[in-house]
């Protein structure tokens, strides 16, 4: 698996409708489901079962569940160490937990990322300054599962 393979896998999900808690290419996924699907396609079996979650999951408790899962299963990188295929974790509001994910597709001036976005489905978006300001962690996917 190369970084290009990760980007190709992520782009293969573009057009998949947004469906909360789902992870089926072409049928539906949310942002976590997209990362899970790319993991399955490019790496192998998922490293842990995902329990059911609500749309506001982790917020009432202030629980950084996605951040902790990223630390368990991926390698944390410096925010400015950009590479195609990196998993990006976003905090959508300053006072909320980080709970939006995407995969970096391009770097440099035309930087972009693939993500599942409510109301849009899986799309590739410019990694514009407003999006960059929301990034709280950057992770590299493992090259293989244990």
Image (spheres, rainbow, N blue to C red):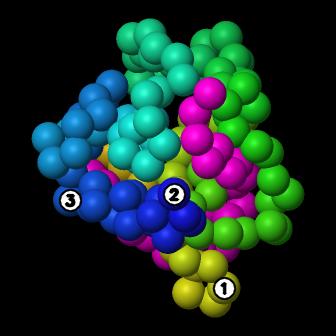
* Secondary structure beneath label 1: helix
Which residue is identified by label 3? Answer: 15
Please state the extent of the stretch shown in magenta in the rendering. Answer: 119-146
Looking at the image, residue 96 sits to the left or right of residue 3; the answer is: right
Q: Sequence order check: which comes first, mark 1 or mark 3?
A: 3
Label 2: which residue?
1
Q: Earlier in the sequence, mark 3 or mark 2?
A: 2
Q: Does the stretch in magenta take in 138? A: yes
Identity of the residue drawn at 67% across and 11% down: 61
Instruction: Tell me the element at label 3.
Output: loop
Q: Residue at x 66, y 85 (%)?
A: 108
Taking the image as drawn, is residue 130 in sight?
no
Q: Nearer the viewer, residue 3 or 126?
A: 3
Q: Nearer the viewer, residue 116 or 76?
A: 76
Left or right side of 8 for 78 = right
Q: Position of residue 48 (x, y in %)?
A: 52, 17
Indicate whether 15 appears above or below 26: below
Look at discs 2 and 1 and give the one toward the viewer.
2
Q: Which mark is residue 52?
A: none
């Amino acid at each position: 698996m190369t970084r290009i393979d990760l980007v190709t896998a992520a782009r293969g999900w573009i057009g998949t409708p947004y469906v909360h808690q789902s992870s089926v290419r072409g049928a539906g996924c949310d942002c976590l489901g997209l990362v899970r699907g790319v993991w399955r396609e490019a790496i192998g079996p998922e490293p842990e079962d995902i329990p059911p979650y609500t749309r506001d999951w982790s917020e009432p408790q202030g629980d950084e569940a996605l951040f902790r899962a990223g630390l368990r299963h991926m390698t944390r990188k410096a925010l400015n160490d950009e590479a195609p295929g990196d998993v990006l974790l976003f905090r959508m509001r300053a006072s909320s937990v980080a709970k939006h994910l995407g995969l970096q597709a391009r770097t440099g001036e035309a930087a972009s990322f693939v993500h599942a976005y409510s109301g849009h489905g899986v799309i590739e978006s410019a990694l514009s300054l407003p999006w960059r300001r929301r990034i709280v962690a950057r992770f590299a996917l493992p090259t293989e599962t244990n």
